[in-house]
Image: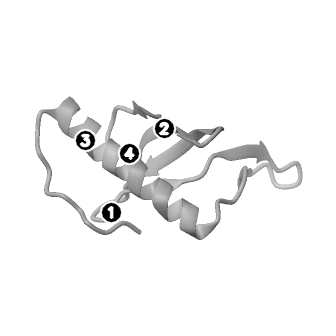
Amino acid sequence: MIEIRFLDGDRPLKAFVDIQVGDWIIHDLRIVKQNCQRASVLPPQVSWKDPATGAIRFRGVFTIPSEQKQLIDVAILSAYQKEKEKKDGTKQPQQTTFR
């Protein structure tokens, strides 16, 4: 199961994704696409305000081992591309490699 929630607007954060991996469900993975770069999948994160500086800080909730991360990324980016094509009514060239 992969659920994609697209975000409107022209910003790097394109969507939030929930994915089921076996018995586990991972909520709020992020699809980010910077200018002229490939889309990438980032893990969920938490934020807090640093009391000393007042700056907003971010930290990932957990780390996914690289082999599993690559499989998850491919599945998510493939589903994202298909849903984006349906949403936009366009067909984009297939990307065969993901970072």
What residue is pinned by disc 4?
A: 11
Counting every numbered tag in the picture gives: 4
- Mark pair 2, 3: CA separation: 15 Å
Judged by depth in the image, the label closer to the viewer, 4 or 2, is 2
Q: Is residue 2 left or right of residue 37?
A: right
* Residue 49 drawn above or below residue 52: above
Q: Are marks 2 and 1 in contact (CB under 8 Å)?
A: no
Q: Which amino acid type is marked by label 1?
A: Arg
User: What percent of the width, then of the height, locates residue 12?
Assistant: 40, 50
Q: Secondary structure at mark 4?
A: loop
In space, the residues marked 1 and 3 are separated at their CA atoms by: 15 Å
Q: CA distance from mark 3 to mark 4?
A: 20 Å
Question: Element at badge 3?
Answer: helix
Q: Amino acid at mark 2?
A: Phe
Q: Position of residue 25 (x, y in %)?
A: 62, 37
**Whether residue 40 can be seen here:** no
Q: Nearer the viewer, residue 84 or 69?
A: 69
In front: mark 1 or mark 3?
A: 3
Write down the quadrant of residue 28 in the picture.
top right
Q: CA distance from mark 1 to mark 4?
A: 14 Å
- Picture coordinates of residue 22 (x, y %)? 60, 43
Q: Tell me which numbered mark, 1 or 4, is placed earlier along the sequence.
A: 4
**Mark drawn on residue 82:** 3
Question: Could you tell which of marks 2 and 1 lies nearer the N-terminus?
Answer: 2
Q: Which residue is mark 2?
A: 16
User: Which tag is nearer the camera, tag 1 or tag 4?
Assistant: 1
Q: Earlier in the sequence, mark 4 or mark 2?
A: 4
Per the image, the residue denoted by label 1 is 38
Q: Could you give the CA–CA distance between mark 2 and mark 1, rounded to whole angstroms?
A: 16 Å
Binning the other alpha carbons within 10 Å of mark 3 as few (below 14), some (14 to 19) or many (20 upward) gives some
Compared to 44, does 69 lie above or below? below
